[in-house]
Amino acid sequence: MSAAALERALVAGGGLWSSVEVVAATGSTNTDLAARAARLPEGAVLVAEEQTAGRGRLDRSWVAPPRSGLFFSVLLKPGDSVPQERWGWLTLLAGVAAATGLSRAAGVDTALKWPNDLLVTVNGEERKTGGILAERVGEGVVIGIGLNVTLTEDELPVPEAGSLILAKAAVTDREPLLKAVLRSLEQWYGDWRAAAGDPAASGLQEAYAADCVTLGRHVRADLPGGRTLTGTAEAVDADGRLVIRTAEDKHEAVGAGDVVHLRSVR
C-alpha cells in the first residue's frame, strides 16, 4: 500500500486524518501508535502490511500472512467535547464504521458481534473476519482494527474464522477498502463528537443495534472472575453494555466479558 496515495486521498484541511504511515511489518500497530500518542496529533493512522504480534481482546493473538488483510490503528482525542464516561462507545463506533465502510466498498454484508467482532457469511455460516481493540492512552484512545481480506481456507488461523474473499466480496484491493473504512470512521466519529458522545442523539446506538447479530440470540457471557451468565441478549444500553435476560426473567447489563452465540431465538 502507498502511504503517499492514502495521504492524498484522506488527509485534507479540516478533516480528521492528520497523517498516514505504512510500515512493512511490526509487532502491533496499537502498541507502536500508543507509544507515540503523546507526541502525535489526533487523526494519526498507522498501517502495517504484516503484524507479527497483533492483539485482540483478552490478549488473544491476531496473526495473518503478509498483505493478506488490513492491520491498522488510529489515534483519537475526543477531549472535553465528550465526557470520558462515553468514551467506551468508541469500540462500538469503530465496529459500525467498519461494517458500513466494508459493506459499501466490498459489496459484502458485514455484521457485528458484541462488543468488537466483525462477521461475514461464508457458505451459510457466520464467521469472524475482523476485530477491534480500543486502548486508552493518556488523553486519547488508540483504536486498532484487524481484518482478514484475502486469506484462503488453508490460511485461516481457526475454522471459525473467515475473510472477505471467502465471503465473495466484490472488491479485495486493500487500499480502497482501507479508505472506505477510514472515511466511514471519520463520519461516525464526527457525528458522535458533535452530539457530545450521546449514542442516541448521534444515531450510533440505533445503528449498532441494527447491525448487531448478538441481539435476539441465546448467549453465554463468560465474565471476569470466572462467573458465567446465560440468557437472551435483548439490547445494548446507553453505556454500550449488553443487556441479557436470564431464565429467571432478570435483566443484567454486561460491560466486559466473552460472549458466545448459542442459538437464535428470533
Image (cartoon, rainbow, N blue to C red):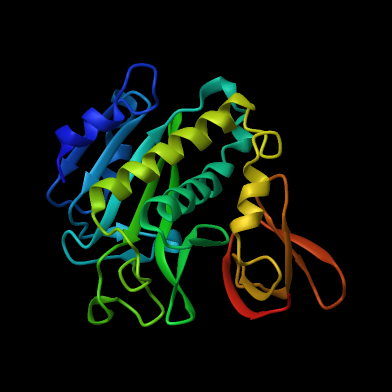
Q: Residue furthest right?
A: 249
Q: Is residue 125 visible?
A: yes
Q: Measuring from the top left, give residue 93's x and y in whole percent.
A: 53, 44
Give residue 244's position: percent from left, percent from top. Answer: 74, 66
Say how many tags the image has.
Answer: 0
Residue 118 pos. (x, y %):
46, 61
Q: Residue 107 is drawn in which quadrant?
A: bottom left
In the rendered structure, the answer to whether residue 251 lies left or right of residue 214 reads: right
Residue in the picture at 12% in, 49% down: 24
Question: Going 57% across and 37% down the picture, which residue do you hit?
Answer: 87
Say left or right for 130 vs 114: left
Q: Residue 179 lies in what quarter of the image?
A: top left
Check the image and report above or below for 74 versus 12.
below
At 58% from the left edge and 61% from the top edge, which residue is drawn?
A: 114
Q: Give the residue at x 77% y 62%.
A: 252
Res. 80 image quadrant: top right
Compared to residue 35, the image places residue 152 above or below, namely below
Q: Is residue 48 above or below residue 69?
A: above
**Most extreme residue toward the left, as rendered?**
24
Nearer-the-camera pick, 62 or 127: 127
Q: Quadrant of the C terminus?
A: bottom right
Residue sitting nearer the eye, 16 or 10: 10
In this rendering, would 136 be left or right of 220? left
Q: Is residue 55 left or right of residue 253?
A: left
In percent of width and height, residue 248 lies at 87, 76
Can residue 30 be seen in this snapshot? no
